[in-house]
């Protein structure tokens, strides 16, 4: 199992697109993934999803074919920064939560 790669999905209602919400969420995901030790983030989207493709492109993601489905495109980004080098506050919370037992997280 690859524990250094994190897959994510992101959905913004059409009414809220273009307001910077996707960009903010993606930046936060990158920060939290780095805090959890991820080396790579990736996701798949429909080839027709111009908004997500544009967001991923602007955010520095690389593109390739999605394995197993020709209707999708995969975007991925290597995370080569230490969590504290990423400008967000939540990395501290994510790092602290790594020390919490899985049973406590499950709830």
Image (spheres, rainbow, N blue to C red):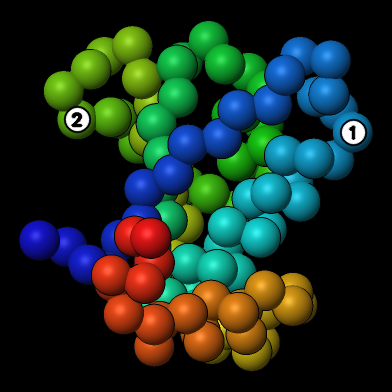
Residue 16 image position (x, y, % from top left): 83, 24
Vertical position of residue 43 compared to residue 99: above or below: above
Residue 58 image position (x, y, % from top left): 70, 44
Vertical position of residue 33 compared to residue 86: above or below: above
Residue 88 image position (x, y, % from top left): 74, 74
Residue 18 image position (x, y, % from top left): 86, 28
Tell me the quarter of the image containing the C terminus.
bottom left
Q: Nearer the viewer, residue 66 or 91?
A: 91
Residue 17 appears in view: yes
Q: Of all residues shown, which one is farthest toward the right? A: 19
Q: Of all residues shown, which one is farthest toward the left? A: 1
Secondary structure category for the residue under label 1 = loop
Residue 59 appears in view: no
Residue denoted by label 1: 19
Find residue 67 and name its label. Answer: 2
Label 2 vs 1, first from the N-terminus: 1
Quadrant housing residue 27 = bottom right
């Amino acid at each position: 199992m690859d524990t250094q790669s994190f897959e994510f999905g992101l959905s913004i209602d059409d009414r809220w697109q273009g307001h910077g919400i996707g960009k903010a969420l993606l930046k936060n995901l990158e920060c939290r993934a780095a805090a959890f030790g991820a080396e790579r983030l990736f996701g798949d989207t429909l080839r027709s999803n111009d908004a997500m493709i544009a967001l991923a492109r602007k955010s520095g993601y690389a593109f390739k074919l999605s394995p197993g489905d020709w209707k999708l495109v995969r975007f991925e980004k290597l995370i080569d920064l230490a969590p504290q080098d990423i400008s967000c506050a939540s990395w501290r919370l994510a790092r602290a939560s790594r020390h919490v037992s899985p049973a406590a997280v499950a709830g």
